[in-house]
Each structure stands twice: as C-alpha cells, then as structure tokens.
C-alpha cells in the first residue's frame, strides 16, 4: 500500500551525524538544531538518525531542477569499457548500462545538459547521443 499510494521524488541524502555536521560547519550542535528545525518545518529537508535529506522543495529553492534530462548513448563495442569508465568521472545524476538499440542511459539535471554533452563529445568511442528534456512529471 505504501508503494502504491506513494510517489517517486528526488532527494539528496547526506549521511552524517548532526554532531559531525555541526563540527564541519563550525557551529554548536544547538545552533545547528535551530537551523535544521526551521528548514524541516519549511519542508526543505527531512532528518533522521544519521542522515539528512534535501527534499524536492529544498532542491528547487537551491535552483536545482527536479525535472531531469536524459541522454541516450550508442557506444562502439570495442570502446565500451573505456567509455563507461570515463562516464563514471563525469558529475551526472545517474548512469545506466542498458540493452537494446542504445548502450547507456544518463540522467542529468536539465541545467547541466549542455555541459555534460560537451564532456561526452570528448570521449572517444561514443558513436551517437540523443538527448531528451522532461517537460513535466506525469506521475
């Protein structure tokens, strides 16, 4: 029921304890709790034992798009391993090796599509790219 009634969302998770985070930010644990409570009440974050999630609302406030772009890649069979290793070095949201007419699917933030494509064009062994930009979330 939870799965059926739920919906897919984008979050960024930071796995850190609050005392470690307060040390990294050079503020007291109490001051951190005040800030986190405000962000949580505004719906920008969720917190739990050892983690902090930035919600879609929080990502949007940071200027990060929650509607991704997709890049489909056709890769030369003899260069696949090298291409996949180079893709691992690029800051993308997710990258998948897939079966079918194309060899890989890369998910990126819409705002980073042009930058990512430029990096992909520099990789020897990528034969073709097709990019798709999302318009809206249907479900």
Image (spheres, helix red, strand yellow):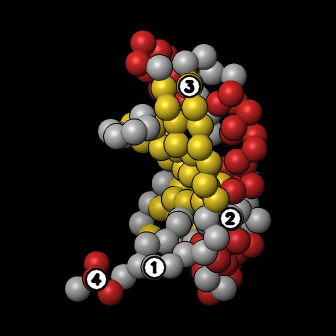
Please tell me which residue is depicted at 74% across the width and 55% down the height of the picture: 111
Q: Earlier in the sequence, mark 3 or mark 2?
A: 2
Give the farthest residue toward the left: 1
Q: Which element type, helix, strand or loop, lies under badge 3?
A: strand
Please tell me which residue is depicted at 57% across the width and 72% down the height of the picture: 55
**Does 18 sit left or right of 35 as displayed?**
left
- Give the label on residue 55, or none: none
Q: Quadrant of the N terminus?
A: bottom left
Q: Earlier in the sequence, mark 2 or mark 1?
A: 2
Q: Earlier in the sequence, mark 3 or mark 4?
A: 4
Q: Which residue is mark 2?
A: 65
Residue 103 position in % (x across, y down): 42, 34
Q: Are marks 2 and 1 in contact (CB under 8 Å)?
A: no
Q: Which residue is mark 1?
A: 139
Q: Residues within 10 Å of mark 1 (few under 14, many from 20)?
A: few
Residue 74 position in % (x across, y down): 49, 32
């Amino acid at each position: 029921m939870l799965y059926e009634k739920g919906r897919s969302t984008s979050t960024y998770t930071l796995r850190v304890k609050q005392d470690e985070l307060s040390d990294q930010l050079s503020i007291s644990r109490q001051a951190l709790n005040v800030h986190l409570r405000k962000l949580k009440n505004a719906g920008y974050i969720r917190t739990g034992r050892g983690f902090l999630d930035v919600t879609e609302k929080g990502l949007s406030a940071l200027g990060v798009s929650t509607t991704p772009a997709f890049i489909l890649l056709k890769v030369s069979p003899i260069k696949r391993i090298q291409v996949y290793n180079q893709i691992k070095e690029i800051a993308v949201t997710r990258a998948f090796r897939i079966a079918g007419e194309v060899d890989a699917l890369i998910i990126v933030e819409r705002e980073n599509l042009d930058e990512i494509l430029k990096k992909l064009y520099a990789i020897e062994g990528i034969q073709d790219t097709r990019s798709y930009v999302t318009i809206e979330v249907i479900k």
